[in-house]
Image (cartoon, rainbow, N blue to C red):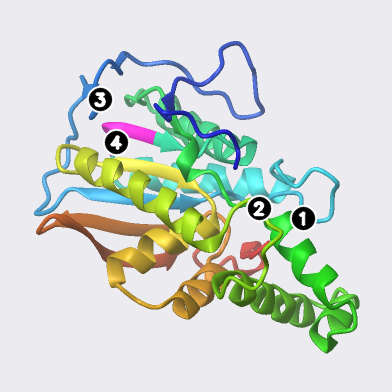
Amino acid sequence: MHGYAANPFQQPPEGSLRRCRAASRTFCTHAWPPQVRSPCVRSIVAVSLFLVRHGQASYAADDYDQLSDLGYEQSRRLGHWLIHGGHRFGAVVTGGMRRHRQTADCVAEAFLAQGADWPEPLTDQRLAEFDHRAVFGAFMARDPDDPVVVASRSGHPRDVGAMLQAALLAWARDELPDVPETWAVFGQRVRMAGERLRALADDTEVLVLSSGGVISRLVQQALDVPDERAVDLNLSLRNSALSELFSGSGRLRMRTWNTLPHLHGERAMWTYY
């Protein structure tokens, strides 16, 4: 269950230098929502919650939780698009996984290079991705001779995608009992994180850097669609894609989904895994 703390909002560890460096800014975290001392400079009708899926991770490596070279470039381009598009964030929240932090650092690099404020990111462990290796492993172990499982061994993206969809649907239907986190529990922790984010987005623009499973569940709740649709949303989400929610009438609502304005005309840089 990833060891979620009673107070999930933690400051990131100090001292780690990454390929994309971020710098600290004054940020008070003694209460929720945090007291942001650099107000949003954009005036819009409804304050937004920007959800970013991390840049491409190391799909074929033993350690998936590490951006690939392409993932770093996707994330840097996102940062450039955001800063030059006039976006300013009063709060930045990550799911705490390495690929989330690395993506945030690349975005921060673009802001700091322009002399713009960049809040010190908060970590909410409830925005960490589900254990995808456990879910997919449990599905394949349940019936190794399932045609979907057999076909996925080819490594062809279409066959792998079919297996991922079948596994996620089985998980959503509670057909995989031997996993560390059920679909329902995962959805509940994402819902709780979403409530905190909604409260924060009432006051300032917020940038959230997380994973496809988390973002698709947040959007599922905003749209009030069934679990099968949430699986489709998850599998459609591209690396470094930007989705926008806003807080209205006491709930989160969707404005945009799965956009790549920073990679316009660069289809070779569009990735899903």
- Residue highlighted by disc 4: 89
The numbered disc on residue 56 is 2
* Mark 1 closeness class: few <14, some 14–19, many ≥20 residues within 10 Å: some
Q: Quadrant of the N terminus?
A: top right
Q: Earlier in the sequence, mark 4 or mark 2?
A: 2
- CA gap between label 4 and label 2 equals 23 Å
Mark 1 residue type: Tyr
Point 32% across, 24% down: residue? 117
Q: Earlier in the sequence, mark 4 or mark 1?
A: 1
Label 1–label 3 contact, CB within 8 A: no
- CA gap between label 4 and label 1 equals 30 Å
Lateral position of residue 168 relative to residue 110, left or right: right
Q: Is residue 61 magenta?
A: no
Q: Position of residue 227 (x, y in %)?
A: 46, 75
Rendered position, 146 above or below 40: below
Q: Secondary structure at mark 4?
A: loop
Q: Secondary structure at mark 2?
A: loop
Mark 3 residue type: Pro
- CA gap between label 3 and label 2 equals 30 Å
* Mark 2 closeness class: few <14, some 14–19, many ≥20 residues within 10 Å: many
First to last magenta residue range: 88-92
- Residue highlighted by disc 3: 34
Q: Position of residue 192 (x, y in %)?
A: 34, 46
On the question of residue 261 being in view, the answer is: no
Label 2–label 1 contact, CB within 8 A: yes
- CA gap between label 2 and label 1 equals 8 Å
Mark 4 residue type: Phe
Q: Main secondary structure of the magenta part?
A: loop
Q: Position of residue 70 (x, y in %)?
A: 69, 50
Q: Secondary structure at mark 1?
A: loop
Viewer-side label of 1, 3: 3
- Residue highlighted by disc 1: 59
